[in-house]
Image: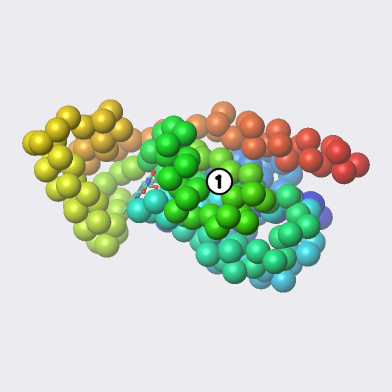
Amino acid sequence: MSRVVVLYKSKYGSCEKYARWIAEDTGADIFDISSFDMKRLGNYDVVVFGGALYAVGIIGLSVIKRNFDMLRDKKVIVFSVGASPAHPEVIEEVKNNNFADEMKEKVEYYHFRGAFDYKRLNLVDRFLMYLLRKKLIRKKRKASLTNDEKGMLASYSTPVNWVNRKSIAPLVESVEEFIKKGQ
Ligand SMILES: Cc1cc2nc3c(=O)[nH]c(=O)nc-3n(C[C@H](O)[C@H](O)[C@H](O)COP(=O)(O)O)c2cc1C
């Protein structure tokens, strides 16, 4: 059995895609966190968790937080997948919104870009995105939008996909180095 496990929570598949690539490249076991028995964490030295970003929240991370005591002696990596690019201010905002101080110190964190197709969204997500669109249009009337906001508005009519296997390289390298050191 592998010493590495990749757990993930995805709604429309982009986070799952990254999780599968990371598991492939590190030889890890992989589970949707919803169907993983956290008692099995004892079997692993490295725990990688990936969650999609919704309203700046990393979905599924609450399970990791609840079981954080079981992760103290392990290497813990968290990655988020969202429409936002991995700008430093985005990274800071996501960290502050999702990690308690203890987690900020312990967890190695990465952010990867996902995909967005308005037509595939369920009703709740469509409604949330409708509200965001209204907000952006209001802002556009008063001030200019950032490039990211312009991109977000454009994506309502044209699906966008930034999922890129190459972006996982630093995460995979970090896992490999940790394993090498332990041998
Ligand atoms: C309702 C809603 C809220 C979202 N909020 C954010 C967000 O706060 N930050 C971000 O970067 N992306 C946000 N996104 C974009 C998703 O994170 C992106 O589509 C991601 O690829 C979804 O991953 P999944 O396919 O694994 O579910 C949002 C998307 C929806 C539909």
Residue 63, located in which quarter of the rendered image? Answer: bottom right
108 lies left or right of 100: right
Image coordinates of residue 144 in percent, x first then y, are 17, 30
Residue 153, located in which quarter of the rendered image? Answer: top left
Question: Which is nearer the eye, 15 or 55?
Answer: 55
Label 1 amino acid?
Phe
12 lies left or right of 64: left
- Residue at image x 35%, y 53%? 55
- Residue at image x 57%, y 29%? 166
Q: Secondary structure at mark 1?
A: strand
Image coordinates of residue 43 in percent, x first then y, are 79, 61
Whether residue 81 is visible here, answered yes or no, is no
If the image is split into quadrants, where does the C terminus sit? top right
Image coordinates of residue 97 in percent, x first then y, are 45, 53
Neighbour tally class for label 1: few under 14, some 14-19, many 20 plus, Cα within 10 Å? many
Question: Which is nearer the eye, 74 or 167?
Answer: 74
107 lies left or right of 97: right
Residue 83, located in which quarter of the rendered image? Answer: top left
| Residue found at the very far left of the displayed protein | 141
User: What residue does disc 1 label?
Assistant: 79
Colour mode of the rendering: rainbow
| Residue found at the very far right of the displayed protein | 183
* Number of residue marks: 1
- Residue at image x 78%, y 57%? 73
If the image is split into quadrants, where does the N terminus sit? bottom right
Whether residue 83 is visible here, answered yes or no, is yes
- Residue at image x 87%, y 43%? 182
Image coordinates of residue 110 in percent, x first then y, are 56, 40
